[in-house]
Amino acid sequence: MVRQDRAERTRNTILDAAAEVFDERGFAGASLSEILTKAGVTKGALYFHFSSKEELAMALIEEQWKADLPFVDFDNVSLQTVIDICHGFAHNIRTNVRVRASNRLVLEANFSRPAPEVYQRWISILQDILEHAQTRGDLRKEWDPALVADWVSATFLGIQSQSEVFTGMADIHERITVLWRIAIPGLVPPRRVSRFQPAGTAQWDAATEAATASA
């Protein structure tokens, strides 16, 4: 158990160091030597856990599924669940370097194994929620949940990119809020529009996020 704990700590140290380097330099600009130096581990320790830079990048891509997101109770989902997931993922990008690095690696997709399955996985999750939401009357019957899920994913991707370019992600919650202010009247039956909060049901503290992101 002691050996397993030590190995897990080493693996986490490597992932944290790799996340910082990938976040700063991207996949092409990152080097294993810089990751080793930042992690303070030997080359043997790194190769014990990861056989290559690509394998290390793929391990980081999986980290976005381990970060905290709003709990999805499929017995009680609504369109608000999708709105909150968008804000929750944005919060993780702002405050969690592993998620931020994971996100950059997926967006770049410039190493030898692109990751379309990450997009497909998110779209599938959103579609499942939207199907439940439509059953309870939150999504207009004329909308195909699969199409809406794909649109939300693509639009969120564009919001991330523009927010990064213009403000370094400082305004991402505001941009997501505008997205949903525009989208809700077109997606939701008129009698239910007022039930949804485009800004999300959680409070996002931009100052705290910024401090965390720069730490």
Image: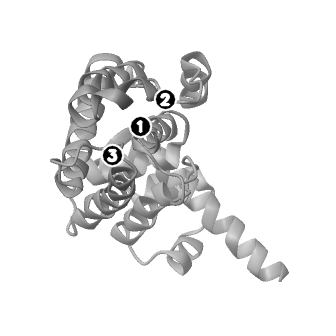
Give the residue displayed 50% in from the left and 50% down from the top. Answer: 98
Mark 1 lies on residue: 83
Numbered mark located on residue 131 in the image: none
Q: Secondary structure under badge 3?
A: helix
Residue type beneath disc 2: Gly
| Depth check, front residue: 87 or 5 | 87
Left or right, 41 with reference to 20: right
Q: Nearer the viewer, mark 1 or mark 3?
A: 1
Asked if residue 67 is positioned above or below residue 174 in the image, the reply reads: below
Label 2 neighbour load within 10 Å: few <14, some 14-19, many 20+:
many
Place of residue 116 in the rendered image (x, y in percent of width and height, measured from the top left)? 22, 63
| Res 41 seen here | no
Asked if residue 39 is positioned above or below residue 3 in the image, the reply reads: above
Numbered mark located on residue 200 in the image: 2
Residue type beneath disc 3: Arg
Give the residue displayed 53% in from the left and 53% down from the top. Answer: 76
| Depth check, front residue: 200 or 6 | 200
Task: State if disc 2 and disc 3 touch (CB < 8 Å).
Answer: no
How many labels sit on residues? 3
Mark 3 lies on residue: 104
- Indicate the quadrant containing the N terminus: top left, top right, bottom left or bottom right: bottom right
Q: CA separation, marks 3 and 2?
A: 24 Å
Asked if residue 175 is positioned above or below residue 85 in the image, the reply reads: above
Q: Kindly give the residue lying farthest to the front in the view shown.
A: 191
Left or right, 29 with reference to 194: left
Give the residue displayed 45% in from the left and 38% down from the top. Answer: 80
Q: Secondary structure under badge 2?
A: loop
- Indicate the quadrant containing the C terminus: top left, top right, bottom left or bottom right: top right
Q: CA separation, marks 1 and 3?
A: 22 Å
